[in-house]
Image (cartoon, rainbow, N blue to C red):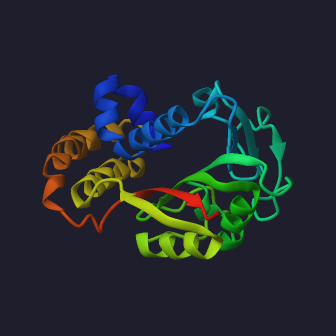
Amino acid sequence: MIYDRVRSLLPGPLARYVMHFETAIEQAVADFAKSLPPHARVLDAGAGEGNYKAHFNAQNYIGLDLAVGDSGWDYSRLDAVGDLSALPFRDSVFDASLNVVTLEHVREPRRVLEELARTLVPGGRLLLIAPHEWEEHQQPHDYYRYTRYGLEYLLSQAGFGAPEIQPVGGFFRLLSRRMLNALQFFPGPLMLVAAVFFVPPALVLPLFDTLDRRQNFTLGYICSARKLS
């Protein structure tokens, strides 16, 4: 993806600044892992290639995915292959779960959240990250985008109480990301020419993001919730 190429070309601090959504996700997962006690049972539901496993070295981590999202990914490191809408685990077996930019790829998101709730102990914690304004990806397995109100409704219906839902950036960070999106339409050397026009505003626009106080134009949401007792 164009994001991975851009990130690989930029110095670390600059890459984290430009790729704000990815940086926020990584930090949220790291903080979530640090907040869990040693040996807690953790389910990464929609683990993909298992990129977050290293954060959970102190816990008992299980990575599960249906392994159909991206033909170029290596799913060999998964602990289990299965459908998120019918998890192959008994009730109340996990202390915590995470579902990171995966809910858009399931046909029945409420059913998936109900399954996550079923397999969590009472009071068990969920970290859910979902996109709001994002391009189609991993086609054809891309079905939904979510508002904060839709996420709150789905979580409450699945048995989670009082979720904390935080937008990841506002209008100007979104516009910055769209500037980077534009590079993919210029083949070969033309991408370097296009970068002269699109990259400078992509670097400047995030500086204005505090002007969007409501952050209705966000790239996505980071949600924390607990299963009701």
Q: Judge left or right: residue 229 versus residue 184.
A: right
Residue at position x 49%, y 75% in the image: 150
Q: Which residue appears at 51% of the width and 32% of the height? A: 34
Q: Position of residue 44 (x, y in %)?
A: 67, 45
Q: Is residue 206 left or right of residue 125?
A: left
Kindly indicate the quadrant of the structure image that contains residue 37: top right
Task: Say how many tags the image has.
Answer: 0
- Report which quarter residue 212 is drawn in: bottom left
Percent position (x, y) of residue 78?
77, 37
Q: Vertically, is 193 above or below 174?
A: above
Q: Is residue 184 above or below residue 87?
A: above
- Give the percent coordinates (x, y) of residue 118: 75, 62
Q: Is residue 84 left or right of residue 169?
A: right
Identify which residue, 217 or 40, lies in the foreground.
40
Indicate the position of residue 218 as horizontal and vertical percent values: 33, 61
Q: Quarter of the image containing the C terminus? A: bottom right
| Residue drawn 68% across the image and 43% down it | 48
Q: Camera-side residue: 35 or 186?
A: 35
